[in-house]
């Protein structure tokens, strides 16, 4: 955790953004092409889209999937790796969203 925080400071990313950056780092070359802005945009977009019950509602989950895929495409993430990256980002969001959603 400490190591991730230090890396975040070095990259200029928040802890949440580092988590998303790491989730996408499955394909190193794709992350290099995308840059840090992609992780920042993913966090911002997903934070805006999550609701208290988004993990249980198929339509809310589908909406977030579309947003993630759009951002990945925008930053040139390889199409053959997008599905796995999208699932990884959604898993990461499920873990982090408990802190994001205000009741």
Image (cartoon, grey):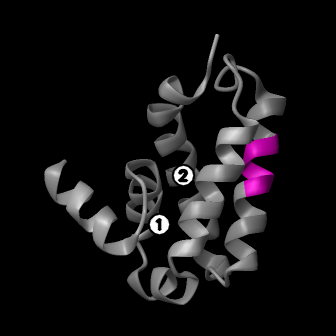
Range shown magenta: 63-67
- Please give the label number shown on residue 86: none
Which residue in the protein does label 2 denote? 89
- Residue 60 versus residue 72 in the image, above or below: above
Residue in front for this viewpoint, 48 or 83: 48
Q: Residue at x 63, y 69 (%)?
A: 82
Residue in front for this viewpoint, 51 or 26: 51
- Please give the label number shown on residue 24: 1
Magenta portion: prevailing SS class: helix
Determine if the magenta segment contains residue 86.
no
Instruction: Indicate the quadrant containing the C terminus: top left, top right, bottom left or bottom right.
Output: top right
Q: In the image, residue 102 lies at what x, y percent? A: 62, 17
Q: In the image, residue 50 lies at what x, y percent? A: 69, 32
Q: Residues within 10 Å of mark 2 (few under 14, many from 20)?
A: many
Q: Residues within 10 Å of mark 1 (few under 14, many from 20)?
A: many
Give the distance between the C-alpha atoms of the residues marked 1 and 2, in whole angstroms. Answer: 7 Å
User: 53 left or right of 36?
Assistant: right
Of labels 1 and 2, earlier in sequence is: 1
Residue that protrudes farthest toward the left in the picture: 2
Q: In the image, residue 49 lies at what x, y percent? A: 75, 38
């Amino acid at each position: 955790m400490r190591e991730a925080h230090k890396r975040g400071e070095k990259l200029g990313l928040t802890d949440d953004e580092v988590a998303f950056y790491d989730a996408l780092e499955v394909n190193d070359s794709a992350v290099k092409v995308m840059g840090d802005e992609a992780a920042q945009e993913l966090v911002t977009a997903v934070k805006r889209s999550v609701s208290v019950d988004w993990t249980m509602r198929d339509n809310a989950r589908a909406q977030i999937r579309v947003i993630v895929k759009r951002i990945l495409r925008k930053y040139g993430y390889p199409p053959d790796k997008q599905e796995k990256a999208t699932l990884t980002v959604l898993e990461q969001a499920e873990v982090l969203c408990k802190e994001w959603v205000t009741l």
